[in-house]
Image: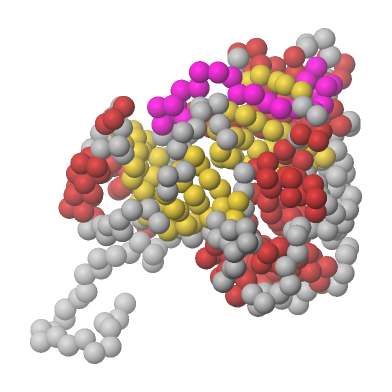
Amino acid sequence: MFLPPGFQTEKPNQVCRLLRSLYGLKQASRQWNAKLSTALSDMGFIQSKADPSLFTKGQGGRFIAVLVYVDDILVTCPDLGMIKNLKAVLDDAFKIKDLGVLGYFLGIEAKLDDSGLNICQRKYALDILAETGFLESKPVNTPIVPGYHLSHSDGEPLNDVNGYRRLVGRLLYLTTTRPDITYAVQQLSQFIDTPTDKHLSAAHRVLRYIKNAPGQRLLYPRDGTLQLNVFKDSDWAACIETRKSITGYCVFLGSALISWRSKKQATVSRSSSEAEYRALASTICEVQWITFLLEDMQSTMQRPAVFFYNNKSAVAMAENHVFHERTKHIKIDCHLVREKVSNGLIKLLLVSSTNQVADGFTKPLPANLFRSFISKLGIQDLHAPPYGGVGE
């Protein structure tokens, strides 16, 4: 360590006292988390088992929740006095900076109005477009071309693989509030080891789609119901290289979308029913975690989560133990579906393929179906001009 330039001292052999080492050492973040967790525990907070970054305390009108990401902290409570007391205690211990009402957090913009909480990543999306030079690009209506499948053998290898990896990494974080690009980004992320010009062109199409509406937002209404509605789908043998299936699901709490995913399955399924059954098992694990998290937030589910399904044979395997011949080769962990059905955690309901919301998480859709997919997810453009208006 060296003294900063221009530093003057009258006494020789003096040393500097290091006040902040949070961003300098690899072990600093762990030590900081341990110290902050200890301080919150001493104040009576309970650390969530479902999400270790969540700390809760009290009940009813005295309930307070603290969400921690390294040194960024969110606090919510019906009692403003409890928030002030918590800030005073943390300031005495750590010298915090109060940024006021939630407006911008980790690249996510939050706006609270009479309808509820709106979150989006418009600034983050515009930063990506500016960095890649796509601010003036021609927009498109879908993030991926319908019917087009990427593979490792497509195109010529890129000279700058780091640029592709950085772009995909930033798009992955953008899916925090943009479920409409989840499937496209999932496809792009499979080729970060050896990307080609074809893969980069597909990534550029995603940027042109973002340019079409960078202010897409999710709304969490004030008066929502505590009912989990789950849509799950799978595309059997969708990968042209490995013939593995793709799982896609979305979870609604009332009318608010709270969880979604698009992922390739770990093993090859022998039939579409097996692929659907495996997808159902992975979705149930997500619903179970959400249930634990809601319990930590003192919101106990009174009714089972409703799974909307469009595969009759998979539902039959989940509810009927007679189908041993069809399922004896499937891993035991997949059979937790039957346990959760019998325990009353979930309820399976058949839905037509046209009403399957999760369809857009497993395959590329044409423009008309993709617009319907976005509408069903509840995604809106917060910065779109009203009908007949003029945009800036």
Residue 2 x/y as whole percent: 30, 81
User: How many labels were placed on the picture?
Assistant: 0
Q: Is residue 305 left or right of residue 205?
A: left
Per the rendered image, the range of residues in magenta is 294-316
308 drawn magenta: yes
The residue at the point 51 percent across, 28 percent down is 225
The quarter of the image holding the C terminus is: bottom right
For the residue pair 389 and 148, the one nearer the viewer reads as: 389
Quarter of the image with the N terminus in it? bottom left
Q: Is residue 149 visible?
A: no
Residue found at x 72% / y 21%:
349
Decide which of 346, 135 is in the foreground and name it: 135
Instruction: From the top left corner, tell me how far across and down residue 152 is, in percent.
Output: 84, 60
Tell me if residue 276 comes above or below residue 133 in the rendering: above
The spot of residue 56 in percent (x, y) is 34, 35
The residue drawn where x is 68% and y is 45% is 375
